[in-house]
Image (cartoon, helix red, strand yellow):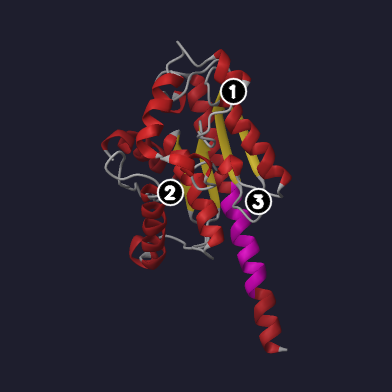
Amino acid sequence: LDTADALCRGLAAEAGFVVVSVGYRLAPEHRFPAPVDDTLAALAWVVASATNLGVDPTALVLAGESAGANITAGACLAARDRGGPAIAAQWLDVPAVDLTFPPTPSYLEFGTGFGLDVDGVEHIVNWYLTGDDRKHPYASPAGSADLSGLPPAVITVAGCDPMRDQGSLYAARLRAAGADVREHCVDGALHGTTWLTGLLPAARECRAFVVESLRELIASRRIDVADAKHELDVERTA
């Protein structure tokens, strides 16, 4: 929670969103799927507490960075499979969405010496996953055979990040499955550039892109929900 605090506060201040930061359980003491389960539990609590929190339960966004984006994408799949809670949009920042780590061009080119060394990442993932869990769709959403029915997505990637291609490929698969996807690449940037809004104009531009995209997706979601309610009211009247 302390690590993500500045990012969450900045997003709340800039976007005017209510931001709920989830203190999910951590590996190695708590392995997969504990963080995904905790995220869904937190989402259900927000829905149940919407009135007290002053939030619209039809306009909820799940968001995460890096490993948090992995959990976000997995939780969106789990929510779809379990019938809710409904998620209006997802923001995946520099996401690791395939923990089998296929040798994509960005993984090979930027895997050493660019701020996120893949040898260390794979070592850490071994604390989180065991056996075939790496291939489980909630751990490696990019490997899921079915990406239909998922929330619209904002996906932000960094040009010199070994995870860049994972994010872009996942964006393409979501589009192919019918999702509305807004994608932005910060050229020449490293993994984690989203945090550097006080230093880099490109990071500020990326944050502005995210905020505007989420606002548009939430507004579209509210219109869809209103239309569905209108159709239901008409049907009941008839």
Q: Is residue 162 above or below residue 113?
A: below
- Local packing at callout 1 (Cα closer than 10 Å; few below 14, some 14-19, many 20+) is few
- State the separation of the CA atoms marked 2 and 1: 37 Å
- The residue wearing badge 1 is 103
Q: Amino acid at mark 3?
A: Asp
Q: Position of residue 190 (x, y in %)?
A: 48, 19
For mark 1, give the secondary structure.
loop
For mark 2, give the secondary structure.
loop
* Image position of 169 (left or right of 92): right
* Residue 17 numbered mark, or none: 2
Give whichever of 104, 100 is nearer the camera.
100
Q: Quadrant of residue 116?
A: top left
Q: Is residue 14 visible?
A: no
Numbered range of the magenta stretch: 216-229
- The residue wearing badge 3 is 146
Total labels drawn:
3
Give whichever of 168, 37 is nearer the camera.
37
